[in-house]
Image: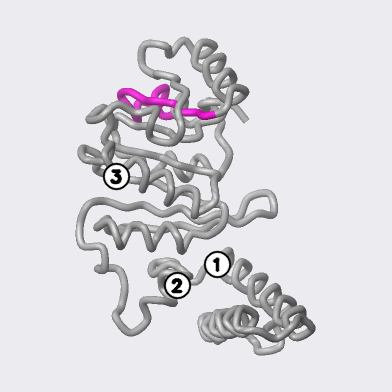
């Protein structure tokens, strides 16, 4: 992968960056995404933020190789510590767990005052991101789910607005798990993801049945049985034997 040809996942992330944005890419690794966005004229300026020495050095090297030092600032920092207040209007965070993305946003809330759009790509635990967005009054405006190299990725796009607008009052918990937009579309990537999750939860239930019975295992069983039930409902138009 390079700054000229991004992975399918990062191309999808880049497609949600508004034209002319000042963007911060947190956890930027080799800085491929900000380099691509600046070279294609999508972003006017970018920050590539990294907390670890190796990826930070790789980002510095990539930006120098592309000759973009005047338009891309590579900085070392934990999460949004790499961004100055008021410096950017778009933030991308891709390739991390949902709980970590939520933590980064929570700890960096002071840096979000002038930010208009969040483009978030959690590898797992997207529901934690949706929960954070609702709590902090960000409106989910679009979602995408895609498959690349046998892995399934979700992309969440949020802007300031009405945090509960995309959700329905009677089905909100399920929509936070599946994604309100993704649940309506139910494309093949969505179906593949939740068929696999359904099967995995079944295996966990089998393991719990062999574990010592206590309040913790009972609560865990209840949670998983609920998830399996709503997953089965979401996939109800499929042949039952596939579940």
Residue that appears at 38% across and 31% down: 81
State the image quarter where residue 109 is shown.
Answer: top left
> Magenta stretch containing residue 220, yes or no?
no
Inter-mark Cα distance, 1 to 2: 8 Å
Inter-mark Cα distance, 1 to 3: 24 Å
Query: Does residue 24 appear to the left or right of 99 in the view shown?
Result: left
Query: Does residue 36 appear to the left or right of 1 in the view shown?
Result: left
Q: Nearer the viewer, residue 218 or 177?
A: 218
**Contact (CB < 8 A) between labels 1 and 2?**
yes
Q: Which residue is mark 2?
A: 183
Q: Which residue is mark 3?
A: 117
Inter-mark Cα distance, 2 to 3: 22 Å
Residue 225 placed where, x, y %?
59, 85
Q: Is residue 187 visible?
A: yes
Comes first in the chain, label 1 or label 2: 2
Residue that appears at 30% across and 24% down: 44
- Quadrant containing the C terminus is bottom right
- Quadrant containing the N terminus is top right
State whether residue 1 is above or below residue 148.
Answer: above
Q: Secondary structure at mark 2?
A: helix
Q: Nearer the viewer, residue 229 or 77?
A: 77
State whether residue 100 is above or below residue 219.
Answer: above
Residue 121 placed where, x, y %?
48, 49
Q: Secondary structure at mark 1?
A: helix
Query: Does residue 4 appear to the left or right of 164 in the view shown?
Result: right
For the magenta stretch, what is the residue range?
Answer: 37-51
State the image quarter where residue 46 is shown.
Answer: top left
Query: Does residue 219 appear to the left or right of 177 in the view shown?
Result: right
Which of discs 1 and 3 lies nearer the camera? The answer is 3
Comes first in the chain, label 2 or label 3: 3
Q: Which residue is mark 1?
A: 190
């Amino acid at each position: 992968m390079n700054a000229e040809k991004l992975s399918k996942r990062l191309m999808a992330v880049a497609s949600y960056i508004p034209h002319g944005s000042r963007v911060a890419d947190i956890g930027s690794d080799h800085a491929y995404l900000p380099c691509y966005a600046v070279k294609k004229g999508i972003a006017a300026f970018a920050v590539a933020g990294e907390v670890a020495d190796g990826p930070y050095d790789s980002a510095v090297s990539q930006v120098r190789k592309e000759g973009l030092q005047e338009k891309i600032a590579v900085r070392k920092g934990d999460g949004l510590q790499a961004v100055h207040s008021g410096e950017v209007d778009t933030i991308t965070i891709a390739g991390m767990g949902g709980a970590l993305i939520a933590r980064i946003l929570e700890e960096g809330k002071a840096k979000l005052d002038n930010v208009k759009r969040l483009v978030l790509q959690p590898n797992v635990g997207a529901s934690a991101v949706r929960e954070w967005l609702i709590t902090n009054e960000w409106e989910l405006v679009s979602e995408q789910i895609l498959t690349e190299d046998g892995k399934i990725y979700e992309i969440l796009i949020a802007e300031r607005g009405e945090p509960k607008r995309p959700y329905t009052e009677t089905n909100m918990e399920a929509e936070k798990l599946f994604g309100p937009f993704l649940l309506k579309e139910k494309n093949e990537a969505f179906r593949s993801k939740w068929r696999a999750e359904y099967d995995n939860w079944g295996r966990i239930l089998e393991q719990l049945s062999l574990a010592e019975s206590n309040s913790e295992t009972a609560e865990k069983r209840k949670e998983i049985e609920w998830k399996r039930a709503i997953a089965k409902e979401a996939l109800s138009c499929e042949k039952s034997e596939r579940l």
